[in-house]
Amino acid sequence: MIRNATLFVLGFCLSTVLFSCAGQEEGKLTDTTAGGKVKLMILNPGHYHAALVQKSMYDRVAPVVQVYAPPGPEVQEYLKRIESFNSRPENPTSWQEEVYTGDDYLEKMLAEKPGNVVIISGNNQKKTQYIKSAVDAGLNVFSDKPMCIDADGFKLLEQAFATAKEKGVLLYDIMTERFNILCILQKMLVLNKEVFGEMEKGSMNEPAVVKESVHHFFKYVSGTPIRRPTWYFDTTQQGEGLVDVTTHLIDLVMWTCFPDQPIDYRKDIVIKKARRWPTMITGQQYEKVTGAPDFPDFLKNKLNSEGVLPYYANGEMIYTMKDVHVKLAVTWDFQAPEGGGDTHHSLFRGSKANVIIRQGKEQSYQPELYVEPAQGTSADELAASLKKAISELQSKYPGLALKRQANSWQVLIPDEHRIGHEAHFRNVTEKYLQYLAERELPEWEVPNMIAKYYITTRALQLAQQ
């Protein structure tokens, strides 16, 4: 059947594309394991993370990418980013974007299935349904966080994981922070019993693990001021702070404290406390970050008497995981101070030492790693085991060194190991491609993803009561 369609090539006007499409068999990845290529489909790319997956080329991935999206500025922003990667002077990419736009974008993708992996990064209101629909169609899914933003979404996500198992497809979320050198070294030191000792259980007043994350609505990505979609400031579409960035923090707690161990949320998790509070967004700030001259109708009924939007981007929770007390907090400010940026504070308490990431003004807003003696121990007593641990890590991370502080040690990390957040998208994508080639995820990954989203959505329920 002939359809009214036109091939879109980057650099020309955007319109509808006629794909030469051969449907994929459910879960079929034999072409990738036999030396063929993974074929990507990008679904409604409303968040810039969709483009960051394509900041690099991959040997296992075909350069032709099929995009399905509603018409509008979001898909245009995505395509501009891909074009900037393709045209950069250093290590340019060579993606060929074939784009279909129309209100039936989801139905069109599911009917045609020209690829075998769907990348989903955009409006979170529909994301869980996108995930479930793609998995039901026998497609692998590589999803940006969060996979769900409320309790109903969590139930649907559980169903999606069950279906993925039945159909033999891989559903996986994009956890970039596992590839952050600070997080890697913190984990290695926490797991070193000579240095760290045993993980403390902690208490409500003094949790064993504390992670705090500060982010900013206005910032630069790949050297360009970020343009957020107009719906970003609607919590029914984006989700509240408790269910968004906290996914990374929870993932790092599991990955560090209980590596390669499945977490059963029904037995291992207890949510103790949760709260949330808003960041106040003015009309001027909204315009600066979205480009929209006024708040849209779906936000106007949420404005206060002064015409300012209370946006519930901030949250804090305390929970136990296998009896270890964990406190997480996420805060969103509008814009970072001069010379600043997003920050991460991370503390793990052990019987011998505490291992801490700090990223404040004292660190010039650059993350730094410290090891402090636990109560009753001195830095001198810690020195021998810590020096031995760093010496052993130097074979993998050359240039690591220790610097004595007043009563602690700073781990000095050469710049060559600090590759930056955007580069981590290549790392996590390559890991997912490896799992596709092996045709399975590690046995702990799925239960831990489910536990992660149980924690976020249950904490939100508790905070909203």
Image (cartoon, rainbow, N blue to C red):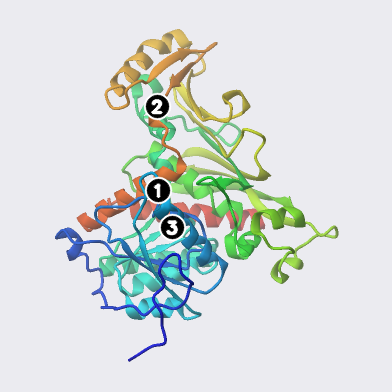
In the depicted structure, whether residue 101 falls above or below residue 243: below
Viewer-nearest of discs 2 and 3: 3
Q: Given the image, on which type of amino acid does mark 3 rest? A: Ile
Question: Are the residues flagged by discs 3 and 1 in contact, CB closer than 8 Å?
Answer: no
- Mark 1 surroundings within 10 Å by alpha-carbon count, few (fewer than 14), some (14 through 19), many (20 or more): many
Who's the residue at 69% across and 63% down the image? 292
From the viewer's perspective, tell me whether residue 212 is left or right of residue 188: right
Who's the residue at 60% across and 52% down the image? 241
- Mark 2 surroundings within 10 Å by alpha-carbon count, few (fewer than 14), some (14 through 19), many (20 or more): some
Residue that numbered label 2 is attached to = 198
In the depicted structure, whether residue 165 falls above or below residue 323: below
Residue 352 in the image: state x and y as whole percent: 43, 19
Q: Quadrant of residue 418?
A: top left
Q: Quadrant of residue 34?
A: bottom left
What SS does tag 1 mark? Answer: helix
Residue that numbered label 1 is attached to = 425
Q: Quadrant of the N terminus?
A: bottom left
Residue in front for this viewpoint, 292 or 435? 292
Question: Are the residues flagged by discs 1 and 2 in contact, CB closer than 8 Å?
Answer: no
The mark that comes first in sequence, 1 or 2, is 2
Q: Given the image, on which type of amino acid does mark 2 rest? A: Glu
What SS does tag 2 mark? Answer: loop
The mark that comes first in sequence, 2 or 3, is 3
Residue that numbered label 3 is attached to = 82
What's the CA distance linking mark 3 and mark 1?
A: 14 Å
Residue 33 in the image: state x and y as whole percent: 17, 59
Could one spot residue 4 in this view of the protein?
yes
Viewer-nearest of discs 3 and 1: 3
Could one spot residue 444 in this view of the protein?
no
